[in-house]
Image (cartoon, rainbow, N blue to C red):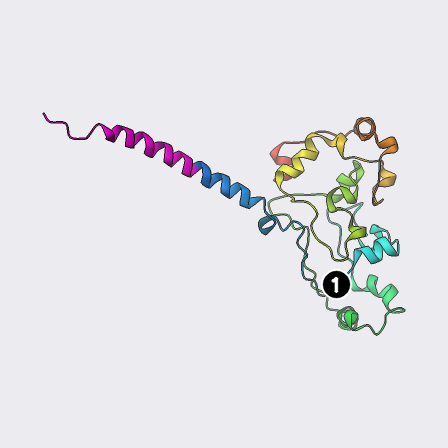
Amino acid sequence: MAQVFHYSTNTLARASVVIALVLVGGGLWILLAIGRTSYITQQEVVREQPVPFSHSHHVGGLGIDCRYCHTSVENAAFANVPPTKTCMNCHSQIWTGAPMLEPVRSSFRTGESLEWTRVHDLPDYVYFNHSIHLKKGVGCETCHGRVDQMPLMFQQNSLLMEWCLDCHRNPQQYVRPREELFTMGYKPPNGNQAALGEKLVADYKIQSLTSCSVCHR
C-alpha cells in the first residue's frame, strides 16, 4: 500500500505542537502581565472626586491625624469616610466662600452625602478588617503609602493577592510599634526592621495566616 502522508508531515506535526504550546504559553503570559498593569489594578491612578481633597495639605501641612476623619479605623472593619459635618467643623470658619468647596456646603445644607469615589476598592469576595491589622502593628502608610505627600489620593500598591500574601508570609518585614501606626515616614530604630519585626511578631502574637478562608469568606 502506498504511503498516504509524506515523511515531512511528521516534522510539521511536531512543529505545530511546539507552536501551539508557545502560543498558549505566550497568551497566558500576556494575560498575567496585563493583569498587573495599572489599567487593571488602578495602581497610582488618581480618581476623580466631587471635591479635590488634598491629603498632603491636611495631613502633611496641617498635621491632622488620620483618626480625625477616619474615626472607626481602630475599632471596625471599615475606615469610614467622614460625614460632611467633619469637613464643616473647620470650613464653617475658613475658606467659607471658596467655589471649590461648594459641594461640601451644599451637602451640609441639604443633608445629602457627597458621593466619593472609593480609591482602595477590594473585590466583594475579599474580606479585610482594618482594626485587626492596626492591632497587629500594620501602619496606615504600609498599605496606603505616604498620603501626607499626595495632593490627590491614589492607590499606592497593586492590592493583588500576591501583595497581601507577601505581608502575611513575612509580617516581620512590615509591622511597627502601635504608637507609630499613624506616623508618616516612620523609620525603625537604627534602621533595623528585622530585629524589631521579630520582636513585635512575638509581642503582638502575629500569626502567618495564609489560608484561603482568612480573606475569602
Name the main secondary structure of what is drawn in magenta: helix
Name above or below for residue 95 compared with residue 125.
below
Question: Based on the displayed image, in which of its 4 quarters is residue 102 positioned?
Answer: bottom right
Residue 210 vertical placement versus 99 (above, below): above
Residue holding disc 1: 52
Q: Amino acid at mark 1?
A: Pro
Q: Is residue 96 left or right of residue 113?
A: right
Residue 90: where, in percent of width, then height?
88, 64
Q: Secondary structure at mark 1?
A: loop
Reply yes or no: does residue 7 show up in magenta.
yes
Which residue: 85% across, 36% down? Answer: 177
Crowding near pointer 1: few (<14 within 10 Å), some, many (20+)?
A: few
Q: Residue at x 73, y 29 (%)?
A: 207
Q: How many marks?
A: 1
Residue 82 belongs to magenta span: no
The span picked out in magenta is 1-24
Q: Is residue 60 left or right of 116 when viewed as pictured?
A: right
Q: Position of residue 173 (x, y in %)?
A: 75, 32
- Measured along the vertical axis of the image, is residue 151 above or below residue 184? below
Q: Which quadrant is home to the N terminus?
A: top left
Q: Identify the residue shown where x is 73% and y is 68%.
A: 112
Q: Nearer the viewer, residue 179 or 14?
A: 14
**Can residue 108 be seen by looking at this rendering?**
no
Residue 200, relative to residue 96: is it above or below? above
Where does residue 111 sit, x and y in percent of width and height? 76, 69
User: Which corner quadrant of the image does residue 196 belong to?
Assistant: top right
For the residue pair 12 and 178, the one nearer the viewer reads as 12
Quarter of the picture holding the C terminus: top right
Q: Locate residue 216, reporting x and y percent.
A: 61, 40
Write down the quadrant of residue 17 in the picture.
top left
